[in-house]
Image (cartoon, helix red, strand yellow):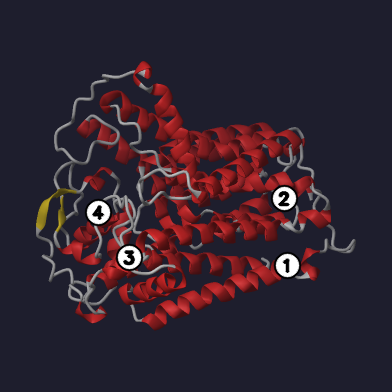
Amino acid sequence: MPRVVWGIVALHLAIVLCQTAVFPNFRAPDERQHADLIVMVEQGKAWPWPGPGELDVSKGSRAGGFTTSTRAPERMHLPDRAVPERDDRASYVDAGGAETGPSFNQLIQHPPLYYLTGAAFLSAIPGWEDVPFDRVYLLLRWWNALLTAALPLLLWATARRLRLPRPLPVAAALVPLAIPELTRNESAINNDNLLVVLMAAVTWLVARVLTGDTSRRTALWIGVLTTLALLTKGFALLLPAWIGLVYLVAARRYDRRAASTSLVIAWVTSAPGALWWAHNKLTYGSIQPDGRTSEPTEVVARYGWSDGGALWLHNLVERVGTLFFMQDQSGRRLHDVSWKAAWLAIALVVLAVLVTLALRTLARSTTLLLLVPVVGLFLIVASGTWANFVTERNLYSGMQGRYLYGGLVGLGVVAVAAAARLRDRVRWCVPLAVLVVAVGLQLLYLRSVLELFWAPRSASGVSALDIGVRAIYHWYALPPAVLLFVMASTVTAGLAVAYSLARPGKRRPPSASAPVIAARAPSDQEVGIPLHAAR
């Protein structure tokens, strides 16, 4: 593995850890509820897993942040707020402990795996109930960052397995850095993070199957990871059908008997996860019940397409697309520079996918299969938001781009595959171009966050930036030296990766003594030859 890939992994992790500082606690979607559910599981209050409507949010978890979890339509001016000194901040016990308030925790509609693993991590923090809870909260955020640290590796490995010519696998590894909302989500306490890395690992194994690995061991791993994903979040329900399509194509390309046997193994080992959802259907009458009420709610469709369906569809595409790259933290849905940058990035990705399909830089069936997760997740999101529209005429509910991240590896590899036919000298500049785009998008994100959260009322320009940065250090739950180290590591890793990608020796194509796999992908007929035989 190239050293630059490890540098990208370090840079990715450092960016996420920086965002745990600049993005205040409670500001991520349902973050307090996620943290509280982890706490309640660790204390035995939410295990065995409660039924719908049976768990409220504890009062103690409010000590984890100094902002509310509602929208911030205007600047919050956090530097102007009085915050206790680091060691004087309230602990979980100080803020009320496990005593519950009137606010329900709807997240019990999800399976428990993420919360069980989070509780195991929490239990390893000595005396966590009595130390300042914002410190515990930050450590839980760090745990989330570590969960997804392998994303660049999985993108690189998938692109390499699919035989994309060098250095495109390195460009694929850089994809997570170019999605600020992804790295922001990774820095928060959210069950999306476990689901994303599990689906990314399944995608890498799918790439192995599509290149001739129809072994039972690979099928077993696919099934195990699918079970874990199904025990994490409902979006994983598309995985068994996707796996069936993958092995159907593998049966056509390779040994039909081996592919059929492996499919059975994958499905059987994914069954334990599917049982969770079957239990929901049998017990509550719904695959995913409403977590807010103990009794099933009757859903009555009162509206239809003529009541604003076109506007709903416009909002769906616009919001999911924008929020895939840039989160609108203010909730004002402004078409500002971040919004424009997000749509420029979307246009580039769509164009790249179309080029890959047109030029067949990957076998067309492989390309379509890699896109199944992101398309399937979008359709699930669309279905959920449409259900909200026809019952409540809600034109925005559930329209989150982060729900598509389970398909990130497939989408990212297909996008960078568009560059496979470029001339050697041009293609070797692609990773550096992706890094430049990533830096630009991350800086735009940082600017919007600083303006919304950390701008003081009484200053502007450089003075406001200085006050905002000082406030970030003051609010940070760990000693400032820790944040200084994280920021210095980010800059150092970024410069090291940029230097590695930009230096002339790396941008020149390899000599004739070091042959490169041809840029042209095999056709659907040619991929019938197993990868090991093709070599």
Rendering coords of residue 159 (x, y %): 65, 51
Label 3 element class: loop
Q: Position of residue 46 (x, y in %)?
A: 18, 54
Real-space CA distance between mark 2 and mark 4, rounded to the nearest whole angstrom: 43 Å
| Element marked by disc 1 | helix
Residue 163, disc: 2
**Residue shown at 45% from the left, 51% from the top:** 196
Numbered tag placed on residue 33 in the rendering: 4
Q: Residue furthest top?
A: 306
> Is residue 214 among the parts visible in the rendering?
no
Q: Earlier in the sequence, mark 1 or mark 2?
A: 2
Q: Secondary structure under badge 4?
A: helix
Disc 2: CA contacts within 10 A as few (<14), some (14-19) or many (>=20)? many
Q: Which residue is mark 3?
A: 457
Taking the view exactly as shown, the residue that stands out farthest to the bottom is 481
Assess disc 4: are there few (<14), some (14-19) or many (≥20) residues with their C-alpha within 10 Å of its C-alpha.
Answer: many
Mark 3 vs 1, N-terminal side: 3
Spatial distance from mark 4 to mark 1, Cα to Cα? 44 Å
